[in-house]
Amino acid sequence: MVYSIISQMEPPKSLFARLILTQVKRFRKILKDDRYFVFWFSLLFYFLLYFNLNNKTLLGFFFLFLFLFYKRFKDLPTSLLILYFLFLPIVKGKTFYFTLIPARLINSQIPYVYGFTVTFADLALLGLFVWLIKNEIDAGWRVKKLSLGKGDFFLFVFLSFVFVSLFYSGFKTVSFLAFLKLTRFTAAYFLIRRFLLRLKIRKLVPLSLAALLVFQGIWAGLQFTFQRPLGRSIEPFGDPLYTYGHTASEESSFFRAQGTLDHPNTLGSFLVMFLAFILLQFFASRKKEERKVFLASFLLGLTGLIFSASRASWVAFLLIGLLVAFFLKKHRAMLTTTFFLPKKWLAVTFLLLIIFLPFLVLPRLSHLYLTLAEKGGVFYRTYLLEKAWLLALSSPLGIGLATFPAVLIQKFGFFTWPAPVHNLFLEILSETGIFSLFFFLFFLIFTYRRFFISLGFLKSKPEFFLKTGAFFASLGFLVTAQFYPFFWASGIFEFFWLFLGIMIY
């Protein structure tokens, strides 16, 4: 209605007013495309979250945007899937805390706890499952089914052995809740494959994920600018030790942005995945406006990655970037845009590096000598890895999901601050046993094998770069997950499963 009133007004005499009217009409034209509608309304959603007060207002935003997306698409699963993406980095909802280590055992004022949160992303996921079951019943269970492969078989066996490990847990309730969380992640893997069979959803996914990259990049930039969390309700405040934000362990004055995720390292890994995915979409895009969106989101995400000061994520991004460059060079004939960035964007990128190199990147790299020193970060991580290996040898069927920090203190005493194992595969090995790790690795091998086999049939299809982007995103996660504790971690591990699903749907 507002646009129709504006269009009927007499042309304004002011040059500035004419410019505004021109931009409004141009923006209205852009919003006719469903992809841009999703992108800009996703950004509007995140902008409004800055003013969110609590879970009640967050629930209001959930239903408001469900209504807006449904009014546009007239399709409930599409609307719920977009909301699912939007809420995944916002780990807010109803949280239940369980004490794993009493405060007295770790010389602390607060105990070490495990938190299980029922999030708004769970609400969207539940809605998708209810719709899917109803749709199957209405169709007499004749809806087009997923094509399951050997990798999926190994995934089911993996989950079975994870469940077996619950019986060896000293905290069975905690391990069971962590298992439910892991099951939710794998359910999302199958769900995204099911809904990507619909062309409409495939078209919306890239720009929907680009909005997440823009949001986290801008939020991290604001945090770094003010050198503190923004103090908004969507930021994680679960740990009283980090009420004023995370700093480098080697230098307490060096602030590290974490976005709306639980740690700067989680933010860095999140951005590595998304940067790899969006970079492929930029070079594959056929429309100028779309390329601008992808490039702007890439640069914002890159600055967020720098502000996270996650050195392992920086290295992972460089490695994945080299692989992406090699891939693009090999498939140059398929690209719809030049392999090289326009000069003005190269200038912007170079300017960003010049600005951040002396006061952020180089100082962070200079902390390496402290990390490598005795009782530094490397010593701390190596100690956790060593104890995880010893526990795996003594408990071949696992010690139970999410219990490693407690078992560490019980078995070896308080030597370092308790934390999960900083390595995905050793975390799986120590907590769920040798058979779980074995079948998880087989799941990955056969899943990637299925992807590579399908590449030969995809080269003439538009989803080629959608799937290859998801492939590089999943590789980015696997690289960073060798240095950080991401098994059953909300806000990061679930995206890995989503990218796997996109890769082989």
Image (cartoon, rainbow, N blue to C red):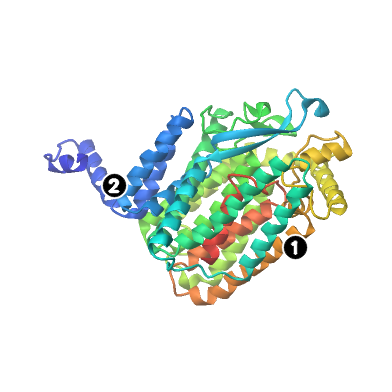
Could you tell me residue 393's position as x and y percent?
Answer: 87, 53
Q: Quadrant of residue 42?
A: top left
Of callouts 1 and 2, which one flags the residue occurring earlier in the amino acid sequence? 2
CA separation in Å, label 1 and label 2: 52 Å
Closer to the eye: label 1 or 2: 1
Question: Which SS class for mark 2?
Answer: helix
Q: Quick check: can you spot residue 300?
A: no
Q: Quadrant of residue 17?
A: top left
- Check disc 2: other Cα within 10 Å, few if <14, some if 14-19, many if 20+: few
Type of the residue with mark 1: Phe
Tell me which residue sits at (82%, 40%) in the image: 408
For the residues bearing labels 1 and 2, Cβ distance under 8 angstroms: no
Tell me which residue sits at (57%, 62%) in the image: 471
Tell me which residue sits at (48%, 46%) in the image: 212
Could you tell me residue 435's position as x and y percent?
Answer: 76, 60
Could you tell me residue 290's position as x and y percent?
Answer: 39, 56
Q: Which mark is residue 438?
A: 1
Q: Is residue 443 left or right of residue 67?
A: right
Residue occupied by mark 2 = 27
Query: Which is nearer the eye, 391 or 354?
Result: 391
Q: Single out the residue that lies furthest toward the top.
A: 109
